[in-house]
Amino acid sequence: MQSYYFYRHQDTGVLSVSQHSHQEHTDFIWIDCLRDDIVHTVDVWQEQIKTQTNLVLNEFHIADILNIEHPCGFDTMEEYDFLTFRKIMTPEDQQIFDSLSGEQHQSEFGLFTTPVNFIITGKYLITVRERGNKSMQNYLDRLCGLLEKNVAEQHKLRRLPSTPLNLALRLLNSMIDDYLGLRTPLTRRVEFWQTELLQGKHYFKQWQQLLQENMAFQQVENLCEEQIETLQELRDEVVENHHHAHDAPSSVDSLDLILVRINDLVSHVERIQKHTSRLRQSIQSAIDLHFSAISNQTNENMRILAIITAIFAPLTLLTGIYGMNFESIPGLKSPEGFWVMLVAMLLTTLLLTFYFYRRHLVG
């Protein structure tokens, strides 16, 4: 558990960050926790949070934090707001699994998702995340880089968040950026299945895998929908209670800025949701084209068989007539009868082929 203190410098009034307490000038405190560190010591962690923030967390929210499969959600209490956001774990995250508990992270389209929990108050932001969360780790690295600078350089390099909600929105923005990176691998998967479905040399047999892929697309869409609903609930809560939580004269401007940030997050998630929907339609179009190609090939095969049948039907009739067991058949004992019959059958075949060719049924 690491604590970061955002405070106003006593001389300049510039917002700065430190890992040491500045009680008289602290604007808010960010407490960053790793889920692995609290999963077996929940009571100790609760006591530490209560000691540092004077917050008593709801037991249901504690259960939600410990539930690795908990979906996105937003809940509000009198003392704090509780937000759960599922982050996509990219290969760069280098996620570490807990082999003792045997916990399995949710997987959509071959990508893992894991919950990140936010406990937001007017003075504190508490985050609970998985070890190896690359987006949050990058933000922490930038923050640690600022810790090594003096106050003047901190203000010049990067504008720090002024409220816990502003910091939470910045963290959410860094995680949602991972969703935009999904577009390239998703598009490649669709191109792969389009190639497999429309290949002309082999029959497609991977229907089970294609069904799983289609379901994975649906799971990504559902995940985006959950996150959009969660962000909208957060926006509604901010609009309703912002003036009660912030009594500063600039609260209206701050509210506008917060709404712009939330709407930007929603638009990013909507972009990947729409992109995934378009890709699902592309797969469905490829499936339709696959069945159309099979139908055309079947019709072509039936046409060829029908032509062959039509050509050989007169030949079968002639051989059937001269194969009857009558004692007297014209030309049966003629030495030229066999060759005459072959010529007649050949002419019949050529005439029928020419007829079908003129009717554009062959060639």
Image: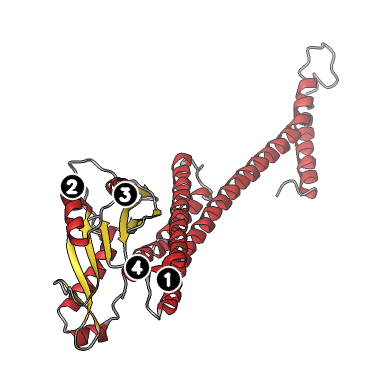
Residue occupied by mark 2 = 43
Crowding near the residue tagged with mark 2, few <14, some 14–19, many ≥20 C-alpha atoms within 10 Å? few
Q: Residue at x 29, y 50 (%)?
A: 65
Q: Which mark is residue 243?
A: 1
- Real-space Cα separation, disc 1 to disc 2, in angstroms: 34 Å
**Which sits earlier in the primary sequence, circle 3 or circle 2?**
2
In which quarter of the view is residue 268 placed?
A: bottom left
Q: Cβ–Cβ below 8 Å for labels 3 and 2? A: no
- Amino acid at the residue labelled 3: His
**Which sits earlier in the primary sequence, circle 4 or circle 1?**
4
Q: Cβ–Cβ below 8 Å for labels 4 and 1? A: no
Q: Cβ–Cβ below 8 Å for labels 4 and 2? A: no
**Which sits earlier in the primary sequence, circle 4 or circle 2?**
2
Residue occupied by mark 4 = 165
Q: Nearer the viewer, mark 4 or mark 1?
A: 1
- Amino acid at the residue labelled 1: His
- Amino acid at the residue labelled 2: Asp
Q: Which mark is residue 61?
A: 3
